[in-house]
């Protein structure tokens, strides 16, 4: 049976991943473009690496949740196909960008151990190699700019459905807060009030 | 005079002649250079290194000990020795400082001390001396020449201020990590103040 909304697990993971993706994009841009002192730049790189590996773990959990919990009915027509393509591309490009980032860290001519929040050292997947390092850096950059473009497309699509089509595409991804009786009901009323064009 | 007495007398004369010869062959002993106490609060041992795609790294060593002996009349009798704890490196970030202590750079576990010991001091002017010495880093000793600006504090008991800048090639000491992304040249900036003991 097709559910009316996304599973709460998928909703929570979606917004966690959204926050982490935006953080990593801004963080990566800042550490490579803005001018900081060396100590701050070093720390920004180390945090970026640890958060990047967090995003890898989160993406794996999201993929598992996506397979475990049924998805609501997608929007019909070309918009639905585009939405599904964008969503699938998010997973693909995220894995590609993180993989390229891991290769950057591993092949760097100046290997700096990646300490995952001080818990353990993430192993490298290749040996230092200046040529491969240059390619991996380019791939990481292209991958992350593509993700930034997808974010723009994804947000534009969600807002178009919310404000122009006035359907529940956005609200069905809205977190529901338990009321004082511990029952999640937020969003259902407004979803119904906005019409049921995309899911029946 | 007995035979024994003659032998002693000759031996005494020979000793005096030898002693006189020794005195005439070696320069008169110079008055010892006075020891000065380094003021750690007014001493900075700093360094800077450039890298491609990364800001210039500037840092300092927090723990060191030094000895300065100064002879104003005979500057060549002056000497200086500094022993810097490599593990006290501080670049303003705990994780970055930890990384610099690792075997990739300072290898502080294996080489806890960076040493400079002068071998000669030459007066350049009333306010400058050239200190020639040996720098030991990562267990490798290389000669190093440093021009030091010296300021004598006019007021109070004898105070001296020193300021020196020099540049070393880290590859000469076997510190190769990150080259050429990380420059081979390391700038050293030393400021110190000392008071006469």
Image: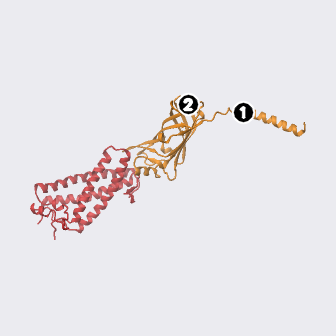
Chain colours: A red, B orange
Q: What chain letter is assigned to the residue under label 1? A: B
The one of A76 and B63 positioned closer to us in this rendering = B63
Residue A115 is situated, as x and y percent measured from the top left of the image, at 38, 56
In the rendered image, the residue lying farthest to the top is B126
In the rendered image, the residue lying farthest to the right is B2
Q: What chain letter is assigned to the residue under label 2? A: B
The one of B191 and A92 positioned closer to us in this rendering = B191
Instruction: Please identify the quadrant where the C terminus of chain A is shown.
Output: bottom left
Q: Which residue is mark 1?
A: B23
Judge left or right: residue A169 versus residue A56.
left
Q: Which residue is mark 2?
A: B123
Q: CA distance from mark 1 to mark 2?
A: 27 Å
Judge left or right: residue A199 versus residue B109.
left
Q: Quadrant of residue A164?
A: bottom left
Is residue B136 in view? Answer: no
Judge left or right: residue B1 versus residue A22.
right
Residue B168 is situated, as x and y percent measured from the top left of the image, at 48, 41
Q: Judging from the image, what secondary structure is the residue with disc 1 in? A: helix
Q: Judging from the image, what secondary structure is the residue with disc 2 in? A: strand
- Which residue is painted at 58% across and 31% down in the image? B72
Is residue B33 in view? Answer: yes
Is A145 situated above or below B27? below
Of the image marks 1 and 2, the number of the one nearer the N terminus: 1
């Amino acid at each position: 049976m097709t559910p009316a909304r996304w599973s709460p697990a998928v909703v929570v993971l979606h917004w966690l991943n959204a926050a982490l993706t935006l953080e990593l994009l801004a963080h990566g841009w800042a550490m490579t473009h803005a001018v900081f002192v060396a100590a701050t730049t070093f720390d920004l790189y180390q945090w970026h690496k640890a958060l990047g590996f967090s995003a890898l773990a989160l993406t794996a959990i999201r993929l598992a949740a996506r397979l475990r919990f049924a998805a609501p009915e997608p929007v019909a027509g070309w918009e639905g196909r585009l939405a599904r393509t964008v969503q699938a591309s998010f997973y693909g490009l995220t894995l590609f960008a993180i993989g390229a980032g891991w290769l950057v860290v591993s092949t760097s001519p100046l290997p700096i151990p990646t300490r995952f929040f001080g818990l353990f050292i993430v192993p490298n997947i290749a040996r230092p190699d200046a040529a491969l390092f240059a390619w991996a850096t380019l791939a990481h950059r292209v991958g992350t700019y593509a993700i930034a473009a997808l974010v723009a497309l994804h947000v534009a699509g969600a807002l178009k459905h919310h404000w122009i089509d006035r359907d529940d595409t956005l609200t069905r991804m809205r977190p529901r807060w338990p009321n004082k009786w511990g029952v999640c009901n937020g969003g259902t009323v407004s979803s119904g009030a906005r019409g049921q064009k995309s899911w029946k | 005079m007995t035979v024994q007495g003659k032998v002693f007398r000759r031996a005494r004369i020979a000793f005096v002649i030898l002693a006189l010869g020794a005195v005439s062959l070696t320069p008169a002993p110079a008055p010892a250079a006075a020891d000065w106490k380094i003021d750690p609060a007014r001493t900075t041992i700093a360094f800077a290194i450039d890298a491609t795609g990364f800001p210039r790294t500037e840092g300092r060593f927090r723990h060191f000990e030094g000895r300065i002996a100064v002879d104003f009349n005979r500057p060549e009798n002056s000497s200086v020795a500094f022993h810097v704890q490599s593990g006290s490196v501080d670049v303003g970030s705990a994780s970055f400082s930890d990384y610099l202590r690792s075997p990739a750079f300072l290898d502080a576990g294996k080489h806890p001390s960076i040493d400079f010991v002068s071998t000669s001091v030459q007066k350049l002017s009333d306010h400058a001396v050239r200190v020639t010495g040996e720098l030991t880093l990562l267990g490798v000793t290389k000669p190093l020449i440093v021009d030091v600006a010296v300021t004598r504090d006019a007021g109070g008991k004898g105070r001296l201020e020193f300021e020196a800048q020099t540049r070393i090639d880290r590859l000469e000491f076997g510190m190769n990590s990150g080259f050429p992304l990380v420059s081979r040249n390391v700038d050293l900036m030393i400021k110190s103040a000392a008071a006469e003991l």
